[in-house]
Amino acid sequence: MTASLTPAARARLLPLQQRWVAFVGKVQARAGEIEAEAAAGLDALMQLNPLDLAPIGGGVAAVETRFRGLSEKLDQALSTLEQEWDESTDALELDGDERRQVGLAWRELQRQRDQAALDLALRRDRLLVRKQADWGRLLQPLAQRECAEPRVCPQCGASFQPKLVHGTSNVACAYCGAINEAFVGSATALYYGGAGVDHLAREQAFERWLTMGAAEQAFKRSRWPTEEDWQQTLAQARAYWQAFYRALVELHPGFNRPVDEAAEAQLAQPIAYDRGSDRATRALRSEVLRLLRGRDLRALQAALARAPQADLADLAGAALEHGDREGALTLLELHHARERSSEPRAQWVSEQLDALEQLLAAR
């Protein structure tokens, strides 16, 4: 709770904050219990019969449901707390600055909820990735034994070896010439068909997957992303898929697609859905921020002259979000000169900068 609040405000709101913090702690403790229970339960299901998809899939779904339930409890608790918070705030009859401070304090509780939800998702994902990879490790020796079993030609009784270990193949008998279709066993089909090698590859690339997810979330949270922000998001996605497919090449003898080509295919959809207007806006922000960093005002004005419809407040927000407060002030002053010249400049610029900072604080 901010120290700038009056004693009366702290007395009303601090207990609510402390209750929330205690509740988040209880949720985190319960998540640890669920994690341990789920790990033991999934191990038991997989050891009982690693070839039985139904109970294993049901166990995975149950884990997801339990973690989702904890996340929903966070939302419900914060919703209940919000009603009490608003009632307390209204009863205090705060002035403008103190009301703003209370609003920022509430936003901090929302951020704690968001972080707690992310922590729950991370615990769930780490658990499931590890356990599903364990399933793959159980399937691997079963698949190897199936592949090593002798095959017999039904025409002459001669033995033969399949051409492929990971899929069905046709093999001509060396003695009678009959064409034999060599099917894969259940364990082999599961191991190479996704339940094994895919989970093992994902486990190997998991840290990259987390980095990719963090980059995507950061881009989504950004109010004024630049083209560099978008390219960084794509770069992290590319790094994950490259790591995934490099692992898959080592695990799957039938995967022979170039790693870079397979990774780029995974990026095709987000790139295709990236709208031209979004690209143009990001590109302008990037150019303006670059010129601001160089403090090249003449080049900046020339760039803005080429984009007369550019939203200078938007560009100022981008500068502020990317750590250039002085650049934001420069753009707001240009904005004032272009559209607000009848209003006192210093006051107007200060108000606009304060509004942008509040938008950033509310992300």
Image: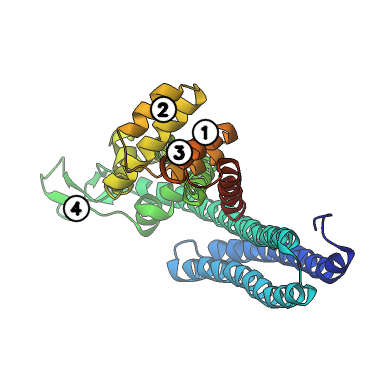
* Residue linked to disc 1: 330
How many other residues sit within 10 Å of disc 2, few (<14), some (14-19) or many (≥20)?
Answer: some
* Residue linked to disc 2: 300
Q: Mark 1: which secondary structure? A: helix
Quadrant where the N terminus sits is bottom right
The answer to whether residue 228 is above or below residue 59 is above
Report, in whole angstroms, how far the alpha carbon at label 4 lies from the one at label 1.
74 Å
* Viewer-nearest residue: 224 or 259: 224
Q: Amino acid at mark 3?
A: Ala
How many other residues sit within 10 Å of disc 4, few (<14), some (14-19) or many (≥20)?
Answer: few
Q: Amino acid at mark 2?
A: Leu
Q: Position of residue 236 (x, y in %)?
A: 45, 38
Q: Position of residue 109 (x, y in %)?
A: 70, 61
Report, in whole angstroms, how far the alpha carbon at label 3 lies from the one at label 4.
80 Å
Say whether residue 12 is visible.
yes
Question: Are discs 3 and 4 less than 8 Å apart at CB?
Answer: no
Task: Write down the quadrant of residue 122 in the picture.
Answer: bottom right
- First of labels 2, 4 by sequence position: 4
Q: Position of residue 306 (x, y in %)?
A: 30, 32
The residue under the point 45% across, 71% down is 54
